[in-house]
Amino acid sequence: MLVSNSPPNRDQKFFALGVIAVLLGAMLLVAPFARNRLEGSEPMVLAYTAAVFTTEMITAALLLSLFAVQRSPAILVLAIAYLYSGFMAVPWALSFPTVLASLGLAEAGQQTTASIAAMRRIGCPLFLLAYAMLRGAREVPAGRLVPALIVGSIAAVAAVVAGVTWIILGNHDLLPRFVDDSRRITHVWMYVPVVALVLYAVLIVLLGLLGRSVLDLCLLVVICALTIDLFLLSFVSAGLQFSVGWWAGRLYSLTAASVILILLLAEAASLSARLARSAAAERRANEDRLVTLQAFSAAVAHEINQPLASMVTNADAGLRWLAREQPDVHEASAALTRIARDGHRAGKVVEGIRTTFSRRGEDHAQLNINQLIRDVLDCYRDECRAAHVVMQTDLDADLPWVPGNRVQIEQVIANLVTNAIDAMRSVTSGERVLLVRSTAMSAGEVIVSVADSGIGLPPEHADRLFQPFFTTKPNGLGVGLTVSRLILDAHGGRLWASENAPRGAVFHFALPCDGSPAALAKEPVR
Ligand code: ADP
């Protein structure tokens, strides 16, 4: 979900309306001076055009890269609108008589600049209309077609602009009389704003009053800026070129060119921030998982290897005693006794692992379980959004402190949340809801439950869920729940699972606390 194609929220709508109000207010401020001529300002046209051209080219480039990812035909057409507008600005600026004179070229005809402007002003809303109509269109198939469309669009727009310019330059006598000899627009020009305004009105209806997406909302601001530009140019300044009103119109045009660019840059910034956050969360989760896994495997290896090695040695020895010509039953039975002893030792593996995990002491602190839940959920926010999972919490505000190891309890919550999200990935119907609840029990316990609306727990798996290396995931290790149970055992707690209604699973864990209601965990202590 990108900022540009997500629906606008209330704040964004208010912001857009605020921008439109400011644009309208600025026009009213300029209106009394609109017909004052700004003498000698004509060369500034080149600087203005450079700014518009650069802005529209960057916007087009960003839209084309968005198209390369999303492959939406509407985004391609929007990029084409910006390419067209940017390319058309170049012959427009170059056809000004003083610009041509300063470049040492012959003067263009009176109507050239206005005709190019008319083509630009009618062409842009036509492309925007095409964008509005294509929004629901199917994605372009991935593959070579996408780069071909990008290169082809750039080439086609450049060719169209060159063709239009060539026709306008070559047929000066046939051009409509848009400006008179004093370079003031005539009544013929009035068709241009009228047609453009009708197109803008249709566009606003098509986009929906406040837009379906943030991008649409920004386009409404663009249309508003372009409409004010047309008003300033055609009516308020009475068509007087290089007047205050005419230049104000250029500023509105530059504003219109920049709105989508600002949106796309904001989107790029928010995307990279999200990427950095999720990379950090992923790294942290991986480190936590690795630490627990290392501790777990070290404990298992340590506890099991010793008795196993000893059992093999004794079994070899026993076989040797029995393989003698005169089997020494006494020694063989001593070897078997030692094997039995080692077998008992191996049987205490779980106890040994518990000892490893229950290294109470300096690692233990008074924990605010609600804060731990919030911290863990923060790390999974982006993953949930990507998996279309709605995250909900129901945290008991009067939770007592819980003594425990912060990293280990966080690991337990993280394991349960990961499993819940994974369980919902393959569910296609209904809402995907992750609900984490904390409750203070009167029996001196805190209970945390992680509920999902995922695939649920088939009865045939019920007994095996907490067994080491049991997994139904293609890339699963099957140690998450085992480690979680070991950690909770070491804390004197419990972990169990139940069915959720109407579907899904709930994993609960209980941790003992001192039970004193006075020890309310209002402040985070970690
Ligand atoms: P892994 O993450 O490698 O699967 P776990 O011990 O975390 O290991 O989980 C073991 C198995 O328990 C999972 O593969 C899955 O089949 C099942 N399981 C765990 N949590 C859930 C859940 N919320 N819903 C359904 N099945 C689950």
Image (tube, rainbow, N blue to C red):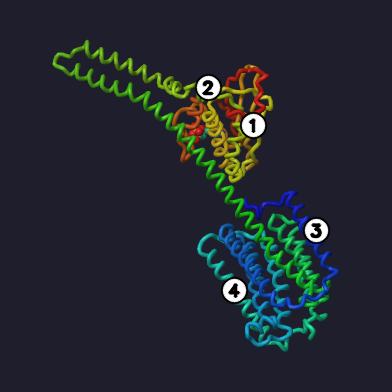
In 3D space, how far apart are the residues under numbered discs 3 and 2 (Cα atoms)? 61 Å
Q: Which element is circle 4 on?
A: helix
In 3D space, how far apart are the residues under numbered discs 1 and 4 (Cα atoms)? 58 Å
Q: Position of residue 385 (x, y in %)?
A: 61, 44
Instruction: Name the disc covering residue 491, or none.
Output: 2
What amino acid is at disc 1?
Ala
Between 274 and 296, the one nearer to me in the picture:
274
Q: Which element is circle 2 on?
A: loop
Q: Position of residue 328 (x, y in %)?
A: 19, 12
Q: Quadrant of residue 165?
A: bottom right
Q: Residue at x 72, y 49 (%)?
A: 9
Q: Residue at x 52, y 32 (%)?
A: 411
Q: Which element is circle 1 on?
A: loop
In 3D space, how far apart are the residues under numbered discs 4 and 2 (Cα atoms)? 69 Å
Cβ at disc 2 under 8 Å from ligand 1: no
* Residue that carries the numbered disc 1 in the rendered image: 501
What amino acid is at disc 3?
Ala
What amino acid is at disc 2?
His
The first of marks 3 and 2 along the sequence is: 3
The first of marks 3 and 1 along the sequence is: 3
* Residue that carries the numbered disc 3 in the rendered image: 21
Cβ at disc 3 under 8 Å from ligand 1: no
